[in-house]
Image (cartoon, rainbow, N blue to C red):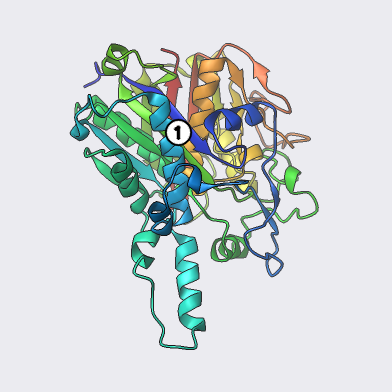
Amino acid sequence: MNDIRVVVTGIGAVTPLGNSAQATWKNAVEGFSGAAPITKFNPEKFKTHFACEVKDFDPKSCLDRNEIKRSDLFTQYALYAAHEAFGDSGLDMDRQSPFDVGVIWGTGQGGMGTFEDEMKSYFESDYTPRFSPFFVPRMIPNMASGMISMKFGLMGVNYTTISACASSNTAIMDAFNYIRMGKAKAFIAGGSEAPVTEATIGGFTAMKAMSTRNDSPATASRPFDPERDGFVMGEGSCALVLEEYEHAKARGATIYAEVSGAAMTADAYHLTATHPEGIGALRGMKLALQEAGLAPGDISAINTHSTSTPVGDISEMIAVANLYKESSKQPVVTASKSMTGHLLGAAGAMEALLSIMSVKEDVLTPTINTQTVDPEIPDEIDIVLGEARQTKVNAMMSNNFGFGGHNAVVVFRKV
């Protein structure tokens, strides 16, 4: 199984930083913040009034009327990103068995917007209450993977991963493993989320998990800063085409990077908090590196999960410091959620995209907004602060951790 290599041959995105993969990458390198006041509803009843929304999204650019009518926004984002990634990959389904290409897709909550709208309509109706026949298909989390397969005629393995904020890293890992087992030649893998809704914003606000820096949304997400006060909600989708290396090479595909290792662990600690000593995170990173055949010193940088929460940022940095305890190389980290916000189930795909482009372009995206570094963070950690860093990037590790104690780590490297 380990003789089969897996590479990335297509990328697509619709994110708070841009409505394509390249626009997202360009704005990430420039240190652009996607945060602004919420426009999807009036947030005044909540303590948080801002989010990292997708801007100027037009599903009609690649979806037909029926696809739009039958799908929640999280599925529309998924189809949009998958359309770009599939086109970018150059896969020709006229020359490819549809059973050799699958879809594994991550989301944390699925069609929350649909659920809200339908329940409001039901309870506010002056007539006989009724639900739309599209209520269930629009709401259920697996519909994004299903509709992607329908759009492109992909009849291979097809399912949805739900592991909270680790969901799309889990999807990428599963696709990687299915290809290595010889069960498929290629996958569309990634994640999507449309959580800028009253229920989601209200729920996370009630947990006191989100920043309330309403006077300065663009600077609210500030990982590692002593004044961080919670994460900023983000939305959107990123899609990758993962392909068996020899298959990609034979058809002359463009290769962005290789997926060389992945792992999952559990904290077994708390409903929402990460383990304070980062034990599960550390184990996940070690296993992913082991599978990739790399040592910590071989990793050029880590795109950390760091969400700008008081507890989570520290525990992850403790894990990173312990990972490098026996290495002569200083760990380098960057936190792209400072720009994108936290895309929940789509976060892993978002950060995978940036990690892959870092490997391809030899540029590390910056951590913005952090004015000073929390003294609890180990001194030996080198954080890419303020501006992008031009440097040789041979391998990137991407971390994502979810409520319930789910830890998912993926390693990308140059081919």
Is residue 333 among what the camera can see? yes
Mark 1 belongs to which amino acid?
Answer: Glu
Q: Tag 1's secondary structure? A: helix
Task: Please tell me which residue is depicted at 40% across the width and 29% down the height of the picture.
Answer: 87
Task: Please tell me which residue is depicted at 46% across the width and 52% down the height of the picture.
Answer: 74
Crowding at label 1, few (<14), some or many (≥20) Cα neighbours within 10 Å? many
Left or right: 179 as drawn, with respect to 210: left
Quadrant of residue 82 in the image?
Answer: top left
Camera-nearest residue between 379 and 142: 142
Task: Please tell me which residue is depicted at 26% across the width and 17% down the height of the picture.
Answer: 247
Q: Position of residue 135 (x, y in %)?
A: 38, 67
Q: Where's the N terminus, which quadrant?
A: top left
Is residue 287 among what the camera can see? no
Q: Position of residue 115 (x, y in %)?
A: 45, 67
Left or right: 105 as drawn, with respect to 237: left
309 shown above or below 285: below
Task: Please tell me which residue is depicted at 67% across the width and 42% down the height of the picture.
Answer: 34
Camera-nearest residue between 86 and 113: 86
Q: Which residue, given by chain and number where applicable, does mark 1 sit on?
A: 84
Q: Position of residue 380 (x, y in %)?
A: 65, 23
